[in-house]
Image (cartoon, rainbow, N blue to C red):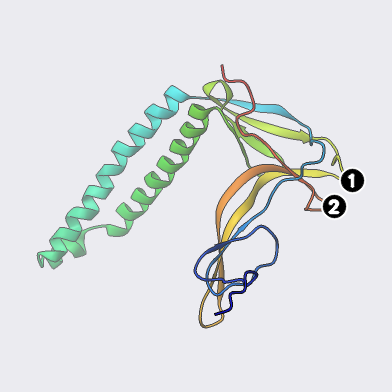
Amino acid sequence: MKITNNQNNFNGTTNFNGPVQFAGGDIINKTSASKQNEAKYTPEPKWRSPFTLAALSWISVIIGILGLFPAGKILANALSLLKGNVEAVLDFPVQTYSVIFIIFALLFILFFSLRRIAKKQIRVPLILNYAISGYGRRITLEKIHIDECPRCGGKMKYYSKPIEWVDKYYSDGRTKREVTKRIPVLECKRNSEHWYEVDPAEDKVE
């Protein structure tokens, strides 16, 4: 039996480094940052919010407790429906309580995310070169001023770049890309291959 050592077998999930891959199953893609020089930026505080870590913690707890009320009403209505009490279901303002519950859920996610940023004291990109910083355990809105690209002199942008994703291929020819990891980067607007990873926790922790 002859064995060929340079034969490529692509079965199941395969890891690659590069822009083009061919496989019979899902593909995990990764990109790497530029190694030449370093891109420089300066954060400018635009608005220092009153939301400290302690305040965000209390707000998250209060919103979570208040959200239990509409959730309890919806659950009680669902149990009544299972018991065959149709009149109670018709009289129940399900849409109103559902909207209230969704609002509380979105607020809880928002303030819990802000609490995470303040607790870890990290910087998270927004849009148009703005960022939210939790340095000092307080939420601050910042404008990110970026120097020219160190490789070509082009303008740069600050955002969360997808660096790992899974390309899923289906038997009917459809493809679906699912991003599995994003990182804050400075990326050249002239050439997207000129990008540099930014440490979200590079500011010194108090």
In the image, which is nearer the foreground, mark 2 or mark 1? Answer: 1
Of helix, strand and loop, which one carries label 1? loop
For the N terminus, give its image quadrant: bottom right
Residue at the extreme bottom of the image, as rendered: 172
First-in-chain label (2 vs 1):
1
Viewer-closest of 206 and 109: 206
Q: Which residue is mark 2?
A: 190
Q: Quadrant of the rendered structure where residue 153 is?
A: top right
Q: Are marks 2 and 1 in contact (CB under 8 Å)?
A: yes
The number of numbered discs placed on residues in the rendered structure image is 2
Which residue is found at the position 26% from the left and 49% from the top?
A: 71
Residue at the extreme top of the image, as rendered: 206
Viewer-closest of 153 and 73: 153
The amino acid sitting under disc 2 is Arg
For the C terminus, give its image quadrant: top right
Q: Is residue 142 above or below residue 105?
A: above
Residue 152's tag is: 1
Q: Is residue 51 above or below residue 106?
A: above
Of helix, strand and loop, which one carries label 2? loop
Residue 177's tag is: none
**Callout 1 environment at 10 Å: few (<14), some (14 to 19), or many (20+)?**
few
Q: Is 123 on the left-hand or right-hand side of 96?
A: right
Q: Is 20 on the left-hand or right-hand side of 26?
A: right
Which residue is found at the position 76% from the left and 45% from the top?
A: 34
Instruction: Name the spot of residue 36 as percent of width and height, x first.
Output: 81, 40
The amino acid sitting under disc 1 is Cys
**Callout 2 environment at 10 Å: few (<14), some (14 to 19), or many (20+)?**
few
Q: Is residue 95 above or below residue 205?
A: below
Instruction: Name the spot of residue 188 as percent of width and height, x first.
Output: 80, 47
Q: Is residue 107 above or below residue 15?
A: above
Q: Is 16 on the left-hand or right-hand side of 128?
A: left
